[in-house]
Image (spheres, coloured by chain):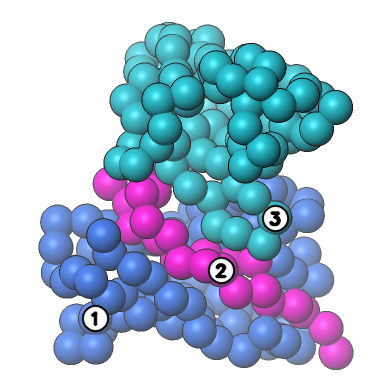
Chain colours: A cyan, B blue
Amino acid sequence: EIVLTQSPATLSLSPGERATLSCRASQNIHRYLAWYQQKPGQAPRLLIYDASKRATGIPARFSGSGSGTDFTLTISSLESEDFAVYYCQHRSDWPIFGPGTKVDIK
Amino acid sequence: QVQLQESGPGLVRPSGTLSLTCDVSGGSISSLNWWTWVRQTPGKGLEWIGEIYHSGSTKYNPSLKSRVAISVDKSKNQFSLKLTSMTAADTGVYYCAKIVHYLDSWGQGTLVTVSS
């Protein structure tokens, strides 16, 4: 069974700074990885799929990269609405999620 | 974009059965997608429960399979979840969503608490 790990658990940054979040898979998952953003009291929202494709309506400051076992979500310049929890997800036999990275205000 | 809305009781007794419904609007449940239930609990984070195709084909999380049933009602454009033998560990927010390989449309979620 594939396991996803995310690092760091918490990332404390200021608005305008660059955020780099990591997701590592326990096996080669090629480019079959998605990233979601979740704000308090809301459902997760799909940001990135197939490792680097932005979902509909997602701003260009969000970008994804990676393949195989190592993946990165980059937010080029944090805006106030970007402080949230971010999850990675892969579907093997079923969808599995990482534990999340919280991006909070420094 | 399709919209989803969960409904059902927010409180379930221990050993009881959870019943939730997801209403789909802005699109047909008979489209080429699977429809899924995901929950978010303090103990396990985001956890896939299972999914259904409009034909009635289902897939379930092996860890929950003995307790889960998902069904579809095409006439009402909705699908439903039943989870039996509820315990405190099942307390959390339950979401319905549309899925291909990724979950691109979600309901707002409904909080389910297991308590006597």
SS under mark 3: loop
State which mark lies toward you, 2 or 3: 3
Q: As displayed, is residue B25 above or below residue A28?
A: below
Which residue occupies 46% across, 66% down? B107
Q: Which residue is mark 1?
A: B77
Q: Position of residue B106 (x, y in %)?
A: 43, 60
Which residue occupies 63% across, 26% down? A78
Determine which quarter of the picture holds residue B93.
bottom right
Which residue occupies 39% across, 48% down? B103
- Asked whether, in this view, residue A8 is left or right of residue A32, the answer is right
The disc at residue B109 is 2
Q: Is residue A46 magenta?
A: no
The amino acid type of the residue labelled 3 equals Pro
- Label 3 marks a residue whose chain is A
Q: As displayed, is residue B55 above or below residue A2?
A: below
Image: magenta residue range: B93-116
Q: Which residue is mark 3?
A: A40
Determine which quarter of the picture holds residue A19.
top right
Contact between marks 2 and 1 (CB within 8 A): the answer is no
Disc 2 to disc 1, C-alpha distance? 18 Å
- Asked whether, in this view, residue A64 is left or right of residue A32, the answer is right
Determine which quarter of the picture holds residue A67.
top left
